[in-house]
Image (tube, rainbow, N blue to C red):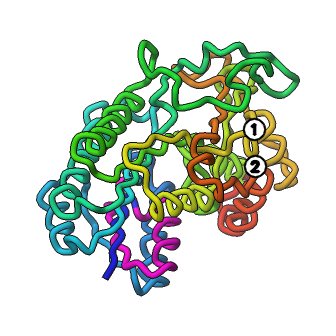
């Protein structure tokens, strides 16, 4: 028996990983206590996904456990022991806005929870591949120091700059404003690296840009493209904060991300850190995303603009994927932003239309 343990198994990345690794013959153990609803309200609940996975996947077993609960987590890991070949740690408090309101919970989930999962892996399955879903917020607001050029619908980096292909892993994480969320994720990120270097475990960090897909339970504080399309369909007002709405994000579909996980699982490089996102293939500004939502939904977007930007928000983020692609040349980004938004629309429009604002 070969087992994959996936935390945050009902979330966007976790659920995609569950489906992927169950399909290739692993017995998949999901750990998810539905805390997303506490963070963002009932509309962001992932309980519907938990039910779907349990119904559709006979190789899936779900545990309603908090990643901070050492006793419960150890009990799960001890049950499967050395049969555990893969651990994907995708559970998190994912919003830097939310973190500012409850820093203690944010840190306990992101940092202490990661410590719990790492130590359980070390004690019970030290040979397992351990994949951690980190974030580009570990770089704080340092990307805002880059030489950016204002264009009609976006900010863009000077094409002669060394980061013209995207931001690499060598960018410093020191001396910048991170947000409390960024700080808790840095703590976990470094801890994962240290378990690889100090204990010799097969740990890998993925520092993600915007993660997206039709299964994202997007909300105002998290889930950029999914929530944007939901607002377009339902007429829900949306607020753009600062930078003239020209701030740029790269967006990676959960399918492409999990394909990267699979590449690492088959040929792990212990202690590696990778920036991962849509890169130059899949990125957009806020203005460009809204325009696409209007075209796809055939509805006028209901938004307002506030001059003040969100504190620590990136003006321009595009991931440099070349390091990962040099190690795994068979992997590439297959979804771009228009395709992602079309898929989000097609798979959710009927459900969202029932919520339309009059």
Measured along the vertical axis of the image, is residue 153 above or below residue 11?
A: above
Q: Is residue 21 magenta?
A: yes
Say whether residue 223 is visible.
Answer: yes
State the residue position of label 2: 337
Q: Do the residues labelled 2 and 1 touch (CB within 8 Å)?
A: yes
Label 1 packing within 10 angstroms: few (<14), some (14-19), many (20+):
many
Q: Relative to 232, does residue 237 appear above or below in the rendering?
A: above
Location of residue 214 in the rendering, given as x and y in whole percent from the top left corner: 64, 61
Q: Is residue 26 left or right of residue 148?
A: left
**How many other residues sit within 10 Å of disc 2, few (<14), some (14-19) or many (≥20)?**
many
The answer to which of marks 2 and 1 sits earlier in the sequence is 1
| Residue for point 71% across, 69% down | 350
The magenta stretch spans which residues? 9-35
SS for callout 1: strand
Residue 315 point in image, percent of width and height: 65, 23
* Quarter occupied by the N terminus: bottom left
- Residue 11 appears in the picture as rendered: no
Residue 216 located left or right of residue 4: right
The residue identified by callout 1 is: 284
Q: Which residue is drawn at 28% across and 46% down?
A: 114
- 110 or 174, which is in the foreground? 174
44 horizontally vs 184: left or right: right
């Amino acid at each position: 028996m070969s087992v994959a343990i996936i935390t945050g198994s009902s979330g966007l990345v976790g659920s995609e990983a569950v489906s992927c690794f169950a399909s290739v013959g692993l017995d998949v153990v999901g750990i998810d206590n539905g805390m997303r609803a506490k963070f963002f309200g009932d509309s962001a609940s992932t309980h519907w996904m938990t039910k779907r996975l349990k119904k559709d996947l006979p190789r899936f077993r779900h545990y309603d456990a908090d990643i901070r609960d050492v006793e419960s987590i150890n009990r799960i890991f001890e049950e499967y022991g050395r049969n555990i070949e893969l651990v994907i740690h995708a559970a998190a408090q994912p919003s830097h806005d939310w973190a500012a309101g409850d820093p203690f919970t944010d840190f306990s989930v992101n940092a202490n929870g990661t410590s719990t999962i790492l130590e359980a892996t070390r004690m019970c399955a030290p040979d397992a591949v351990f994949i951690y879903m980190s974030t580009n917020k570990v770089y704080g607001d340092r990307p805002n120091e880059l030489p950016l050029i204002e264009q009609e619908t976006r900010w863009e980096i000077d094409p002669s700059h060394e980061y013209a292909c995207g931001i690499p892993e060598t960018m410093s994480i020191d001396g910048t404003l991170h947000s409390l969320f960024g700080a808790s994720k840095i703590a976990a990120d470094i801890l994962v690296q240290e378990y690889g270097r100090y204990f010799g475990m097969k740990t890998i960090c993925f520092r993600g840009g915007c993660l997206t897909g039709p299964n994202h339970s997007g909300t105002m504080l998290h889930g950029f493209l999914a929530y944007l399309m939901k607002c377009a369909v339902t007429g829900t007002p949306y607020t753009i904060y600062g930078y003239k709405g020209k701030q740029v994000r790269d967006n990676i579909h959960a399918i492409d991300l999990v394909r990267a996980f699979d590449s690492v699982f088959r040929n792990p490089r212990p202690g590696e850190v990778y920036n991962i996102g849509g890169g130059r293939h899949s990125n957009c500004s806020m203005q460009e995303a809204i325009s696409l939502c209007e075209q796809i939904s055939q509805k006028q977007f209901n938004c307002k603009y506030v001059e003040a930007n969100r504190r620590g928000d990136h003006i321009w983020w595009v991931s440099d994927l070349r390091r990962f692609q040099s190690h795994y040349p068979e992997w590439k980004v297959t979804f771009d932003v228009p395709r992602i938004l079309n898929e989000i629309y097609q798979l959710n429009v009927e459900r969202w239309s029932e919520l339309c604002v009059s």
